[in-house]
Amino acid sequence: MSAPSHLALPTVFLHEASEADWPELLEFETSNRVFFEKWVPARNPGYFAQEPLKLIIQGLVADPDRFYLIRNQHQQLVGRINLRGLGKEPYNSAELGYRVGEQHLGKGYAKAAVLALAKQAREDPVLTQLVAFAADNNPASSTVLQTCGFKQDEAATKTVKLNNVPLTLLHFVLPL
């Protein structure tokens, strides 16, 4: 028997972050800290404490940007996803970013969450595109974006330093 050509996506729920989420978010970020630091700059150690994280969440709640927790069908926190740059020039564009906990990789949560947030973004009459970046050493992230309809914009690729090592960030665009 051959494998199916596509697998059903898992059910995900995007829950807009609130101040009440800080304990669960702190646990998620702490337990995945070493894993995340392979792909993104390390956070200030103060981030991983109750009061600073509560203040960060308060700022996120007040900001026009959107910050969501990704929950699975059992309401377990499996990742987070956000839209940044809302209300800033260019007004028709927002930057999508996400991270999924290490133990939840390869289960379709990233793809399901990106598709859900893109669908929501299409309902915004101002937005005409989403942009996203993926590190060139993280092909799984590029695959998620491309599978969700993002196209790579090679002209906008940029290089940053991660742990003092140059890292190429591939730029992707999704017309809405």
Image: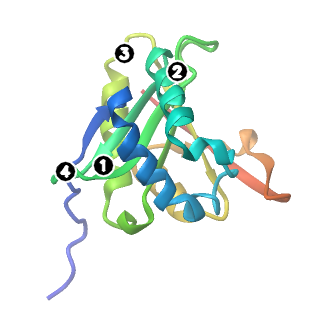
Q: Which of 29 and 123 is in front in this view?
A: 29
Looking at the image, is mark 4 or mark 2 nearer the viewer?
Answer: 2
Residue visible at 47% across and 20% down? 128
In the structure shown, which secondary structural element does the residue marked by tag 2 occupy?
helix
- Is the C-beta separation of discs 1 and 3 under 8 Å? no
Q: Is residue 51 visible?
A: yes
Q: How far apart are marks 4 and 2 (CA)?
A: 29 Å
- Is the C-beta separation of discs 4 and 3 under 8 Å? no
Given the image, on which type of amino acid does mark 3 rest?
A: Asp
Q: In which quarter of the image is the N terminus?
A: bottom left
> Which residue bears the numbered disc 4?
11
Q: Residue 59 carries which label?
A: 2
> Which residue bears the numbered disc 3?
124
Q: Which of 74 and 81 is in front in this view?
A: 74
Residue 141 vs 23, above or below: the answer is below
Q: How far apart are marks 1 and 4 (CA)?
A: 7 Å
Give the image's coloring scheme.
Answer: rainbow
In the structure shown, which secondary structural element does the residue marked by tag 3 occupy?
loop
Packing grade of label 1 (10 A; few <14, some 14-19, many >=20) is: many
> Which residue bears the numbered disc 1?
112
Q: Nearer the viewer, residue 163 or 160?
A: 163
In the structure shown, which secondary structural element does the residue marked by tag 1 occupy?
helix
Q: Residue 56's x, y, as percent?
A: 54, 29
Q: Residue 58's x, y, as percent?
A: 47, 22
Instruction: Kindly indicate the quadrant of the structure image that contains residue 162.
Output: bottom right
